[in-house]
Image: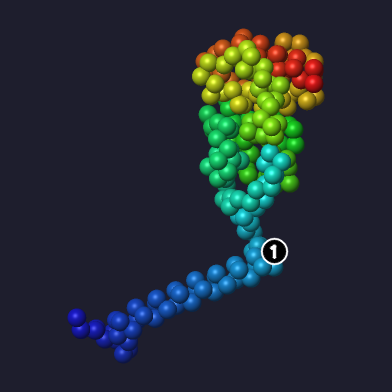
């Protein structure tokens, strides 16, 4: 195919080559600028650093995080901690509850970047290193407190956080303490019995 000469003496092939070369130069410059900034430990003004460190279950984990990414998404799909369930994904059901500095939080409504410099605990981090279950987990096993158990991790995490500040609650107080969590099987009586058993085991030490 013959090369078409545009007005002004620039051929079509030369024009395309110039566009491609300019794009390559711009891309290279952007890469070099980003590399330099990373090497200096900084990010451009107004930008959000994507490669961050999270303390999850006692370990520092480096993870690439989008600015709008929720902690629930990061835990499940970046770190493989699928015990954190995503139910409503709008801070209503509590299935995604984790502890941030020992305080129960809906991880679907917390941006991952907001969890930096906090201690994140998921259901996977409750058991001891030798595999011994946390007392609340043990209470669930003993009382068989759930049906489908999809909501179980959220209830357990909410109960653990509540019991840290209310170690000897009445049944009504315990119900109030985990009232931000919903069970789609509606088996609340068995759930409370299991959590109360966990509270008892915690008091025994």
Which residue occupies the extreme bottom position in the image? 9
Element class at badge 1: loop
Residue at 53%, 29% in the rendered image: 87
146 w.r.t. 92: above or below: above
Residue 132 occupies quadrant: top right
12 w.r.t. 32: above or below: below
Residue 44 occupies quadrant: bottom right
Colouring mode (rainbow / by chain / secondary structure / one colour): rainbow
39 w.r.t. 120: above or below: below
What residue does disc 1 label? 41
The answer to which of 195 and 27 lies nearer the viewer is 195
The answer to which of 79 and 44 lies nearer the viewer is 79
Residue at 56%, 12% in the rendered image: 187
3 w.r.t. 122: above or below: below
Check the picture and name the quadrant holding the C terminus. Answer: top right
Q: x, y (%) of residue 166? A: 79, 20
Residue at 32%, 87% in the rendered image: 10
Can residue 156 be seen in this snapshot?
yes
Residue 105 occupies quadrant: top right
Q: What crowding class fits label 1: few (fewer than 14 Cα within 10 Å), some (14-19), or many (20 or more)?
A: few
Check the picture and name the quadrant holding the N terminus. Answer: bottom left
Which residue occupies the extreme left position in the image? 1
Figure disc tally? 1
Which residue occupies the extreme front position in the image? 130
Q: x, y (%) of residue 9? A: 31, 90
Q: Is residue 183 left or right of residue 198?
A: left
Q: x, y (%) of residue 35? A: 60, 68
Residue at 71%, 21% in the rendered image: 135
Q: x, y (%) of residue 175? A: 69, 15
Can residue 106 be seen in this snapshot?
no
The answer to which of 77 and 1 lies nearer the viewer is 77
């Amino acid at each position: 195919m013959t090369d078409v000469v545009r007005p002004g003496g620039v051929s079509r092939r030369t024009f395309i080559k110039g566009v491609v070369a300019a794009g390559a130069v711009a891309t290279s410059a952007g890469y070099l600028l980003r590399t330099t900034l990373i090497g200096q430990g900084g990010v451009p003004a107004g930008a959000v650093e994507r490669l961050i460190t999270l303390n999850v279950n006692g370990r520092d984990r480096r993870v690439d995080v989008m600015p709008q990414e929720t902690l629930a998404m990061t835990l499940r799909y970046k770190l493989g901690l699928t015990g954190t369930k995503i139910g409503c994904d709008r801070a209503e059901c509590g299935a995604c509850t984790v502890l941030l500095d020992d305080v129960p939080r809906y991880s679907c409504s917390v941006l991952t970047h907001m969890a930096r410099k906090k201690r994140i605990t998921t259901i996977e981090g409750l058991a001891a290193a030798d595999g011994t279950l946390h007392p609340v987990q043990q209470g669930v096993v003993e009382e068989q407190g759930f049906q489908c158990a999809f909501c179980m991790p959220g209830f357990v995490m909410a109960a653990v956080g509540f019991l840290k500040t209310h170690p000897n609650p009445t049944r009504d107080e315990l119900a109030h303490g985990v009232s931000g969590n919903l069970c789609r099987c509606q088996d609340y009586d068995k759930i409370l019995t299991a959590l109360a058993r966990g509270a008892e085991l915690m008091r025994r030490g």
